[in-house]
Amino acid sequence: MDRDKDNDKDGTTKRKSLKSSFKSILGGDILAGDFFRRQSKLLVLLMVLIVFYIHNRYASQRQQIEIDKLRKELIDIKYDALTRSSELMEKSRQSRIEQYISSKGSELRTSTSPPYVIKK
């Protein structure tokens, strides 16, 4: 029976110590302890490094999104340039120019004789 009383006393003391440690954590009393006073500079350094790490991660994600957006824009611009280049080639063909001139009613014709080379 003495043994049961000791267990009850130990159980209640353990519960009280758990409750008091839980209260000290929630209340902030644990921060006033000797360990935290000695390690305060290290804890501050860790917090600064964590904030820097989080900021760096978000900044790199923002840059990656910007890079992807610019890549898509570059592909669109390349396709647009290719389309315009092909349209220009189509319009500047000799046969297309002749059709255009004849449709406007001009009497210009393609020369059948080769050009003359004038020497001094």
Image (cartoon, grey):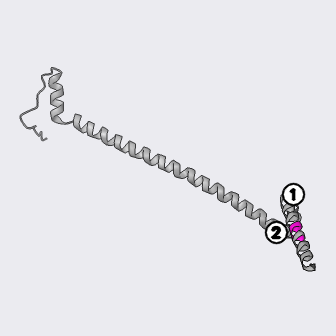
Residue under label 1, please give it: 27
Considering depth in this image, is 6 or 39 the residue closer to the camera? 6
Among the 4 quarters of the image, the one containing residue 19: bottom right
Residue at the farthest front position: 1
Q: Amino acid at mark 1?
A: Gly
Regarding mark 2 in the picture, which secondary structure is present there?
Answer: loop
Span of residues in magenta: 13-17
Residue at left offset 52%, top offset 48%? 66
Res 33 seen here: no
Q: Which mark is residue 39?
A: 2
| Picture quadrant where residue 38 is located | bottom right
Residue 55: image tag? none
Q: Earlier in the sequence, mark 1 or mark 2?
A: 1
> Three-letter amino acid code at disc 2?
Gln
Marks 1 and 2, how far apart at CA = 19 Å
SS state under label 1: helix
Q: Position of residue 94 (x, y in %)?
A: 16, 35
